Amino acid sequence: MSNQVAQQAAVPEPPTEDAPRRDVGRELLHRLFNGTPMLSVLAVLASLVVGAILIGFTNPRVAEAAGYFFARPGDTFAALWQAVSGAYISLFQGAIFNPNRMDSVQQVLAPLSTTLYYAAPLIIAGLGVAIAFKVGLFNIGGRGQMLVGAGVAGWVGFTVPLPPVLHVAVALIAGALAGALWGGIVGLLKARTGAHEVILTIMLNYVAYLGIQYALRNPDLLRNQENNNPVSPPMMDTAILHSLPGFRVHAGILIAIAVVILYWWFIERSNLGYQFRAVGLNPDAARQAGMNVGLVTTLAMAFGGAFMGLAGGVQVAGQVTSGFTANIDAGIGFEAITVALLGRSSPWGTLVAGLLFGAMRAGGFNMQAAQQIPIDLVLVLQAFIVLFIAAPALVKTIFFYPKGARS
Amino acid sequence: MTNTPAQNSAQLTEHEAGVPEQEVHLERVQVRKWRPAVALTSLTIVAFVLTVGFGNDESTVFRFARPNDFFLLPDLTLGVRVVGIVATGIMAVISAFAIMRTIQRQKVWGWLYIVFGALFIIDFLTWAAAGKSFSFTDLMIASVGLAVPLIFGAMGGVISERSGIVNIAIEAQLLSGAFSGALVASITGSLTAGLIGAMAAGMLVSFVLAAFAVRYLVEQVIVGVVLNVLVVGLTGFFYSTVMSENPELNSSGRLPRLPIPGLSQIPIIGPTFFSQTIIVYLMYAAVIIITIAMFNSTWGLRTRALGEHPLAADTVGIRVRRWRFWNVSLAGAIAGLGGAYFTLDQTGQFTKEMTGGLGYIALAAVIFGKWHPLKATFAALLFGFARALEQTLSAAGSQVPSELLLMLPYIITILAVTGFIGLSKAPAASGKPYAKQ
């Protein structure tokens, strides 16, 4: 008996010396698989699987082969593989690199250039949502703020004659200011009356859309006088963000990177940015510490609106320079929400998320042209990515994490 | 009087116990509330400037008769200037009376607002359609038609938010209902099956919303927005692939109109309310049942408790998460039925993004209606009327810019949430996930 007890007491002894070393490995694994980057990658992977199911489900050749599945099951899987791999390969080729088109430097870099072209406004607009998130506000008014920004930047761009570089700058700044005003109204109303910013921004989206439509029908405001359609005149040559010869990408991506750096400095290094974060973490504590929560709320929405307005300006000065319609926002105002969520509102995260979504847009158009898979698939992928990112516990369940690691 | 959501649960129970009227009266501090009087006066001035100042000597013809009516109402011809002067005159008297009542610290009678509103609308219509003729009955029919999906959506919103889950996904529920209604009805050849399919699809969206909001405690607004994107993407994807390759999957046909004998022949009212499809009659039933159940049943009391104070509800043994889950699912089924209205009542087939953001207007109706089923219904009818007015006036060739009319519901909502037209306050715990301690 006493021997047994002694043995039992002795057994735990040796591992205590070994334990720290084994825990380091475990800790490393734990950190790797529970860290944000890994979960983000898994979220993207999971949504690609969902997309693959959709592609397989709707592919006519898969359906045909499935008709005689029990006779030759291999055919079904072959068709499935062809459909899914074809789709994702064309997505990749449209966004990053296409080995079939390598005749010139332009051709080799064309996919990347297209990705950057679509990414620029997405990154800027994503920061417009991110800065509001930092203060605990939800800016879903990107559409309205972009439309107002695009309208004002466009108006400056086709009516006010100015020297080359200055003209673009003035147009973009005017757009940003208009967006700041449109977003600032929301912040002010929220600070003063306590009305929910989500409702206010949704409503102002429609007001802006209808307002731009009205202005585009009216030749005294935004409509092209030579045309009866609700389209604006083309931008003056001095107000255009010119692209490199042979490429689609233009200076908008440089502006986007500059804005990312500005955002990083503001949030991480400036006094006001510190107040933003404090209010976002705990408004009551921030108020106790003497911060003006109402002012921070108003400014956060105004800054968010300014980013959105700038994105709208980039749309009219860089993407659609031949005259814009009321759909100039191209869904970026809403996509920006998913960009900010994916990037977790951090400057570099938003940059990466914007690049990823830009790549998905570029690749999506290529996929639509090459494989006849509707671009709507990209929306589905993006929605699933954000859902999975928002619920890490779900991703862990899907990828069979051990029960203990799921919380 | 019913409980406003702003009250917390303590007041709620006090109210239900029935505090004697006398006591409350003694404690009431009488305050002059200037907002109604100011609103009436400024509307009178706007109406006067528009319809008399910018008026002319033309006249407008209102048509009322429909072929099936019991008796045919004659057309009504109104002169813009005459109506302008008479209507704004009466409106000025009402405003003066309202100012007088306010000075005496008394409330303005409710029916005066209705008279004022009717005068304002008649005056505005006569002015906006000057020199033209249009059918007033068609305007009413279009108003109800445009309001139906809004009302269904608003009912879904009210149930969901009263139980504490913010429902931004009304748009997704409507769109999935429209899609699934058309698809299921086309496959089965049965429109009834289509209706059930639409409810199931709305419910499915709600399952996702509830799973993420209740189980994974994700920010509800984010889930709602993402679900809207997801459903736009999914329905668009299937529409461009499966439905465009097999058009027979998107040809549901339309529900038959079921005129109620007798009632449907009353001029104006009959064709507007009683010559509709089964979906609209289901809507009447839904509004009545939800309104009564919300304030007079165990279900309603528990639902309101979930939205105002889930901890209190939990303490008395209500399973918060389970109740929230099933209430949100019910809300999704109702909104999904509203989605079926687009395909099975109006067009007979699905088109991409056919709900066009109406889910967000339904959300506005919920807020403008102060989270009360009946008030939200009237808000939805008002929004439907604004849209119908835009259609009727632009069809009649009015000079009023249609965009400004279309903006009205949104501006009204902004004024409502910021407290300019009576403050709308959400249920206290709406949007807050409940994690059991």
Image (cartoon, coloured by chain):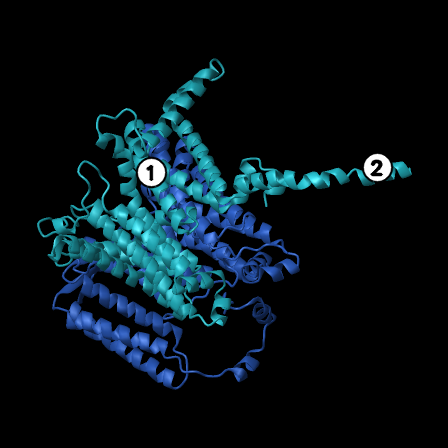
The span from disc 1 to disc 2 (Cα, nearest Å) is: 63 Å
B262 in relation to B80, above or below: above
Label 1 sits on a secondary structure element that is: helix
Residue tagged 1: A359
Of mark 1 and mark 2, the one earlier in the sequence is 2
Can residue B267 be seen here?
Answer: no
Image coordinates of residue A150 in percent, x first then y, are 23, 54
Q: In which quarter of the image is residue B404?
A: bottom left
Q: In which quarter of the image is residue B154?
A: bottom left
A179 in relation to B278, above or below: below
Residue depicted at 42% across the width and 30% down the height:
A52
From this viewpoint, which residue is outermost toward the top? A71
A52 in relation to A340, above or below: above
Mark 1 chain: A
B228 left or right of B385 in image: right
Q: Which chain is blue?
A: B
Q: In which quarter of the image is residue A53?
A: top left
Label 2 sits on a secondary structure element that is: helix
Q: How crowded is mark 1: few (under 14 residues within 10 Å), some or many (20 or more)?
A: many
B10 left or right of B142 in image: right
* Chain A visual colour: cyan
From this viewpoint, which residue is outermost toward the right? A1
In depth, the one of B29 and A46 nearer the eye is A46
Can residue A130 be seen here?
Answer: yes
Q: How crowded is mark 2: few (under 14 residues within 10 Å), some or many (20 or more)?
A: few
In depth, the one of B168 and A10 nearer the eye is A10
Q: Quadrant of the N terminus of chain A?
A: top right
Q: Residue A7 carries which label?
A: 2
Residue depicted at 32% across the width and 65% down the height:
A185
